Amino acid sequence: MLVTWNGSSEDTNNTAFTYIVEAKLAVPNFHVVGVCTSKGTLVCRTLHLDPNTTYIVTVRACTEMDHCSAPSTPIQATTLPSRPLGLTVGIATSTSIQAVVEPTVGDRGMNYQYVIIAESADSTQSCIAVDTSTAQPSCQLSDLQPNAPYNLTAQACTLELFCSLPTEPTSAHTLPNVPEQISVTNVTATTATVYWLPMPTIADDDHNDTYNYVVTYSAGRVPSDEEGISTSSLTLKDTPSYHLQNLQPNMHYAITIKRCTTAGRCSHPSGAVLAITLPDAPQQVFISEVTADSARISWDAPAHGGSVNLSYIVRVVGTNDDEGEVQTCSPSAEDSALSCVVDNLRPGQDYATAVTACAEPGRCSLPIAKEPLHTLPASPSQVQALNVTAQSLLVSWQVNHSSDLHRCTATAHPANGDGAELTCSQQFSPRDNSTEHFLCTINGLQSDTAYNLTVVVCTSADICSQPSQAISTTTLPQSECVCVPFVP
């Protein structure tokens, strides 16, 4: 305790007397616990006093012969609480720091409040830690600047805010801001793109500081540090995004992001964002049972990600017209075979076939490479047998013409299965109308024989329609020959 006073009136130059300062406990018995002496100055410091204790202080002037004056008028003075032994830094976030005080041994249970102050170049914040018997006093400094250095000090204070000297400053640093507004786009079976908002701070005024963004993605709905970790170095001028690769198809992923300085100081992870990869695409597509207006589409199950509980959609899209007609089919839930029949196609048209696997409505695989499909031409119609004789007949039919049709072939099939099939053909010419009747004659038939007549139409690529609906006809009996002698 530093004590000052005014000298005796006889001591004009403050050198005639020795001054004795005594500090006595105010209670219980005025026992002297602190003494200091001074000669030549009117100030001295009493030592070894107890902290946070009230003392009665007096001063006496004494000669060299130890003749002393009566004590001065007593005054009361109270010592400060003990300065805490130290301060440690606990959990830090981008806007807060937890500070833990280490009191002196004698201050335990004194019900002190500890005022902790955080100072930086731009702000000052404080909090009060309360002494408890079960844990070291601690409190959280809030509303701090992200990614900023602070000096922390602590003072022990009475309830009347009579405070000790502050501790030596302890260095602390807030963390960078946690990235926000995380979104996941462009999801495929094995990849996804993650975007986020970087949240700049006062420390980023020039926008040239480089940050490392640690993107953690783990299979399942709960984040884990044991799965994939990727790091992307970006400045605030860059678009904050990262392209995840080598994911598993049809799988939930929990994605978090941390923002780190080049010194390795990282924010806490962001809140987890859940993403679900698409199912893997079906394997090779097979096309069979093609007709003029339908086809069977078959495929193999996806190679990865499992095929249980997947549904499939087959899309057949026309490529020869501006309408882009679309026909679809899906196998029934009871059908274990991976195939279905697409109906309502148009004859003689080119189509592109694609198959997608769906885990749920709206979450389907990307289609595999489209498989080409060409429907058969439409079968001829209105087939008739005309001018039937014993050995020949004239076949008439109607065809819906297209630019790719090349020829029609009529065939007479013996109804009893005996004998050869006989045919005739009719070529298309550029001047043929879109719908026409065609004729051709089949010769060499057996007399008095039943025949079934069918007609097929073929393209220039030798893609032929299914036979028309068979009609039945019978050739005439062979007439007897009447020979008349020739008389010259």
Image (cartoon, rainbow, N blue to C red):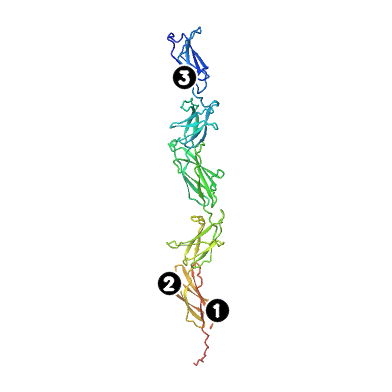
- Residue 53 place in picture, x, y as percent: 50, 22
Identify the amino acid type marked 2. Thr
Residue situated in front as seen by the camera: 365 or 426 = 365
Identify the amino acid type marked 1. Ala
Measure the C-alpha gap from mark 2 to mark 3.
125 Å
Nearer the viewer's eye, disc 1 or disc 2? 1
The 10 Å Cα crowd at callout 3, few under 14, some 14 to 19, many 20 or more, is few
Residue ID for mark 3: 76
Find the residue positioned furthest to the front. 28
Residue ID for mark 1: 415
Residue ID for mark 2: 435
Measure the C-alpha gap from mark 1 to mark 3.
138 Å
The 10 Å Cα crowd at callout 2, few under 14, some 14 to 19, many 20 or more, is few
Find the residue positioned furthest to the bottom. 487
- Residue 228 place in picture, x, y as percent: 55, 45
Nearer the viewer's eye, disc 1 or disc 3? 3
Which element carries disc 3, helix, strand or loop? strand
Instruction: Looking at the image, tell me whether mark 1 or mark 2 is earlier in sequence order.
Output: 1
> Any mark on residue 383, and which?
none
Nearer the viewer's eye, disc 2 or disc 3? 3
Which element carries disc 1, helix, strand or loop? loop
Identify the amino acid type marked 3. Gln
- Residue 382 place in picture, x, y as percent: 46, 75
Q: Is residue 314 above or below residue 392?
A: above
